[in-house]
Image (cartoon, rainbow, N blue to C red):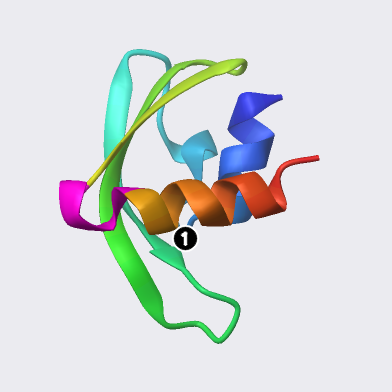
Amino acid sequence: GAKDFVNRCFTNDLAKIGPGQAQYTMCCNEAGGVVDDLIQYLRSDDDVFLIPNAANNTEVVALLTAAAP
């Protein structure tokens, strides 16, 4: 379910790439403002590797934690 979760949290659609591929995406707040840009690597539907910028890492993790089931 990692792929579906990440798709709900970021702007780009992981369905457009396959396992072993990466894409550039944005993390936005509830108002639509950009919190950070990052790279997301799709390893499998249950394994996504995220690389946010170090300066905004804490805020991205906080938004993901709040959105997690």
Question: Which residue corresponds to mark 1?
Answer: 11
Which residue is at the front of the view, 16 or 6?
A: 6
Which residue is at the front of the view, 23 or 36?
A: 36
The quarter holding residue 63 reads bottom right
Which residue is at the front of the view, 15 or 51?
A: 51
Quarter of the image that includes the C terminus: top right
The quarter holding residue 59 reads bottom left
Residue sitting farthest toward the bottom? 31
Residue 44 location, x and y as percent?
Answer: 52, 13
Which residue corresponds to the image point at 36% horizontal and 75% vertical from the top-left? 34
The amino acid type of the residue labelled 1 equals: Thr
54 part of magenta stretch: yes
Q: Main secondary structure of the magenta part?
A: helix
Over which residues does the magenta segment extend?
53-57
Against 69, is 19 above or below? above
Q: Is residue 47 left or right of residue 69?
A: left
Residue sitting farthest toward the left? 54
Which residue corresponds to the image point at 49% horizontal and 55% vertical from the top-left? 10
Q: Is residue 46 left or right of residue 49?
A: right
Quarter of the image that includes the N terminus: top right
Residue sitting farthest toward the right? 69
Which residue corresponds to the image point at 52% horizontal and 53% vertical from the top-left? 62
Q: Is residue 49 left or right of residue 31?
A: left
